[in-house]
Amino acid sequence: MSHALSDSMTMVGRSVRLARRNVDTMIMSIVLPLMMMALFVYVFGGAINTGTGYINYVVPGIILLCTGYGASSTAMAVADDMNSGMIDRLRSMPIRGFAVLTGHVAASVARNALSTTVVVAAAVAMGFRPSATPVEWTAAAGLLLLYVLALSWLAAGLGAVAKSVESASAMSFLMLFLPYLSSAFVPTDTMPAFLRGISRNQPITPVIETVRGLLTGTPIGDEGWIALAWCAGLLVASFVLATALYRRRTND
């Protein structure tokens, strides 16, 4: 166990250093959500009726869009390791294979923590006024952490099987697209019937509704438990899938 922990911490340090040097990815993980938030608040917000200030409605969705982008970059980082010869060098050392993926996932969490903090600070400057107590902020952060871990392990699995960085980017596109088919930007009641069913029965909507309720005081109902179930189930499935795909690829 001590060796496994040591291997994981070594890979975490490596991945964090690589993320720090990859300035363009870090900048885009912050700039893209900020641009999307400005677009929806200042361009579309005046035409969208949500029953409340639109910026208070849209910020939780922008946060999840931000975390999805940050997690999707994990797939490209893992794919780069898999196809650049780095994994072959690591296999010649007494390093446990799952430690490589753990390092990339930890770097993803660190990137997302930074970008989410910047996005929330910018939202406050633009007029976002959360009413959350410290306990509610902690609960929202915990749910977002669980969500980021689940997406990051899923992205790591996609990166493990991708034949190139480009294909890893294409495979992780769903992480960026799925929030648009949720209650992130408009209430689901305004959608056509066939889209409404998709929006209400996918993991993003209950997570957004729970974060929105915790931060702004809107009713949560059963969405909190549903969001936890989705995130926990996705995390377990993604971890098992990612480690299995990694072992299969490295043993070929």
Image (cartoon, rainbow, N blue to C red):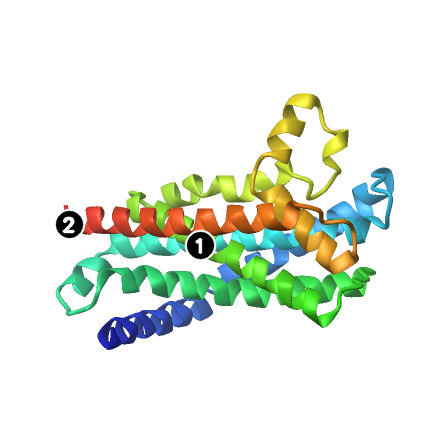
Q: Is residue 45 above or below residue 132?
A: above
User: Which residue sits at x=40%, y=51%?
Assistant: 236
User: What whole-number distance in Å separates the C-alpha atoms at marks 2 and 1?
Assistant: 23 Å
Crowding near pointer 2: few (<14 within 10 Å), some, many (20+)?
A: few
Sequence-wise, the earlier of marks 2 and 1 is 1
- Residue 25, horizontal then vertical, whole percent: 50, 59
- Residue 112, horizontal then vertical, whole percent: 54, 62
Q: Is residue 8 above or below residue 54?
A: below
Of 177 and 24, which appears nearest the observer? Answer: 177
User: Which residue sits at x=76%, y=31%?
Assistant: 189
On the image, which quarter does residue 195 sit in?
Answer: top right
Of 166 and 247, which appears nearest the observer? Answer: 247
User: Which residue sits at x=69%, y=69%?
Assistant: 135
At mark 2, the secondary structure is helix
Q: Amino acid at mark 1?
A: Ser
The answer to whether residue 232 shows anywhere in this view is: yes
Of 27 and 180, which appears nearest the observer? Answer: 180
Left or right placement of residue 221 versus residue 43 in this view: left
- Residue 188, horizontal then vertical, whole percent: 72, 34
Of 81 and 145, which appears nearest the observer? Answer: 145
**Which residue in the structure is indicated by mark 2?**
251
Left or right placement of residue 46 versus residue 185 in this view: right
User: Which residue sits at x=64%, y=68%?
Assistant: 138
Q: Which mark is residue 41?
A: none
**Which residue in the structure is indicated by mark 1?**
152
Q: Amino acid at mark 2?
A: Asn
- Residue 249, horizontal then vertical, whole percent: 21, 47
